[in-house]
């Protein structure tokens, strides 16, 4: 490839819009005083909307950049999901940061850079492109995790995330080197050109590096501390965006392995199934005793990675690829709206100065009696908890139904049964939140009403509406997900 073709440039447009928005915010930070920064969240939302629109309107270009990336329905769905999550997270962050006098251009710029990396990851068809996209995403999220720099937890969270993230990147690079040594190429489509133990080991290391990004057991240890220590809007964005991007590239890698009948491909399916079982079990079991709502949502995020892995594993069965991949895409869209909304409520009840609070800053007691203080806030939180639990008529129910249906179609009955049982276990700690909001009296000092700004109100309303609409009428998004799965290359 000697230069960029018009097709390559058109494929870059959504990412270019996100990067341009980040640069505008960085420049505005130089010229504006702290009292005139209220529009920065608006610029972020506008950039996310334009990038998503550009992805939707651009015709599928197929392979670009010499085959290193693919622009198809799958990548478009991932980009739109990431941009939607970015817009919601920016609205959540606007009030959260303003209340702490921490609204700066670099916060939103880092979020835009991270989203650009996530979007690129959804299009990656080459191991080197995958590494570059992961680093763009990761470096921005490392900085976002430590953004507040107040107290020990943010710094500790960012340090753990950085160290373990560097380790996962090393695994990915080492695996890439082995794959290149065997096949002479880093393209996913060339995996089948090689054979032997080194290829299996190389692909295994690549898979381990990606498993870290999706927080699959046993690569999940960073998740609870990072989710709890990071600023709440950052946690929301990471929970949705990083998971979406990680699963997008994992799907492409495994489809190349299974579709090309790569040596040892059956073993990769067995390993992925084992990871799915462990992730569902440990994620839910570890979430049950948690009283910190942020840690509970962190462990539940691990469990949801397990459900998504069930869909990915099911895609490897003959004749089940379309239904399985469409269920994964739908689940990612539903989970994005749900988890960002849940963290938005957590951020709303969180006190401004966490340093002055004891260790239970996000304890369940903060939600006690919320229905009396803020009935609307309690209602949307109940909707989000029901969706995470997979209870109808919510998006989470439809997502789990499609995942388990795909598993049954793939004759992965054991995965479907374990998924249903662990979902029942998860309902316990999700419904416990609802019980605290509606059946417990407010704690002393928590009786006052909570102030909700317009940006946060819009984010909560949009998330709740999306969760309910996808639960009652999932057809249009499910059809888009099905079309995207058929176009995957």
Image (spheres, helix red, strand yellow):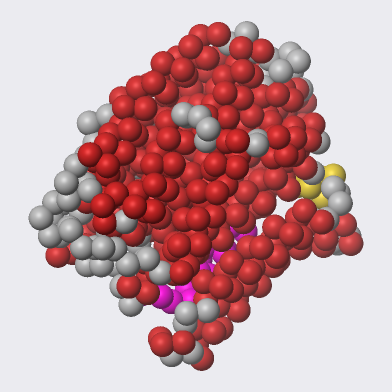
Instruction: Answer yes or no: is residue 101 visible.
Output: yes
Q: Which residue occupies 26% across, 63% down?
A: 449
In the image, residue 201 sits, relative to residue 14, either above or below, namely above
Furthest residue in direction right, as rendered: 6
Magenta segment includes 236: no
Which span of residues is magenta-colored? 102-116
Magenta region, main secondary structure: helix
**Lateral position of residue 69 relative to residue 373, left or right:** right
Which quadrant is home to the C terminus? top right
Counting from the top left corner in percent of width and height, residue 317 is at 68, 15
In the image, residue 334 sits, relative to residue 234, either above or below, namely above
Quadrant in which residue 287 is drawn = top left
Furthest residue in direction left, as rendered: 444
Q: Which residue occupies 56% across, 73% down?
A: 42
Counting from the top left corner in percent of width and height, residue 66 is at 83, 49
**Lateral position of residue 231 relative to residue 68, left or right:** left
Magenta segment includes 106: yes
């Amino acid at each position: 490839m000697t230069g960029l073709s018009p097709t390559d440039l058109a494929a870059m447009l959504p990412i270019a819009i996100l990067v341009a928005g980040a640069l505008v915010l960085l420049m505005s930070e130089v010229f504006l005083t702290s009292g005139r920064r209220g529009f920065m969240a608006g610029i972020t939302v506008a950039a996310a909307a334009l990038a998503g629109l550009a992805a939707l309107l651009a015709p599928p270009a197929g392979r670009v950049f010499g085959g290193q990336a693919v622009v198809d329905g799958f990548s478009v769905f991932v980009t739109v999901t990431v941009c939607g999550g970015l817009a919601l997270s920016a609205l959540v962050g606007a009030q959260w940061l303003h209340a702490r006098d921490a609204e700066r251009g670099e916060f939103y710029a880092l979020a835009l850079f991270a989203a650009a990396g996530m979007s690129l990851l959804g299009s990656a068809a080459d191991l080197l492109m995958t590494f570059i996209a992961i680093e763009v995403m990761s470096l921005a999220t490392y900085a976002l995790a430590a953004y507040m720099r107040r107290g020990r937890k943010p710094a500790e969270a960012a340090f753990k995330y950085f160290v373990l993230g560097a380790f996962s990147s090393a695994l990915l690079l080492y695996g890439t080197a082995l794959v290149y040594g065997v096949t002479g190429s880093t393209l996913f489509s060339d995996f089948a050109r090689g054979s032997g133990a080194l290829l299996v080991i190389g692909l295994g290391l690549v898979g381990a590096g990606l498993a870290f990004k999706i927080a699959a057991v046993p690569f999940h240890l960073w998740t609870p501390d990072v989710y709890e220590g990071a600023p709440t809007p950052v946690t929301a964005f990471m929970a949705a965006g990083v998971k979406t991007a990680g699963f997008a590239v994992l799907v492409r890698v495994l489809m190349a392995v299974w579709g090309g009948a790569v040596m040892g491909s059956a073993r990769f399916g067995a390993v992925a199934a084992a990871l799915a079982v462990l992730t569902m079990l440990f994620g839910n079991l570890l979430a049950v005793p948690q009283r910190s709502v942020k840690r509970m949502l962190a462990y539940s995020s691990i469990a949801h990675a397990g459900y998504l892995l069930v869909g990915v594993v099911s895609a490897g069965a003959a004749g089940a690829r379309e239904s399985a991949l469409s269920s994964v895409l739908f689940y990612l869209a539903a989970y994005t709206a749900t988890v960002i909304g849940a963290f938005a409520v957590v951020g709303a009840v969180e006190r401004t100065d966490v340093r002055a609070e004891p260790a239970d800053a996000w304890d369940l007691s903060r939600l006690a009696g919320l229905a009396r203080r803020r009935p609307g806030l309690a209602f949307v939180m109940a909707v989000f908890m029901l969706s995470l639990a997979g209870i109808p008529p919510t998006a989470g129910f439809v997502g789990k139904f499609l995942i388990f249906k795909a598993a049954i179609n793939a004759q992965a009955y054991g995965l479907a049964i374990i998924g249903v049982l662990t979902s029942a276990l998860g309902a316990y700690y999700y419904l416990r939140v609802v019980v605290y909001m509606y059946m417990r009296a407010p704690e002393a000092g928590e009786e006052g009403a909570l102030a909700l700004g317009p940006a946060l109100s819009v984010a909560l309303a949009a998330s709740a509406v999306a969760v309910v609409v996808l639960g009652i009428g999932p057809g249009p998004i499910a059809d888009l997900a099905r079309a995207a799965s058929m176009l995957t290359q």
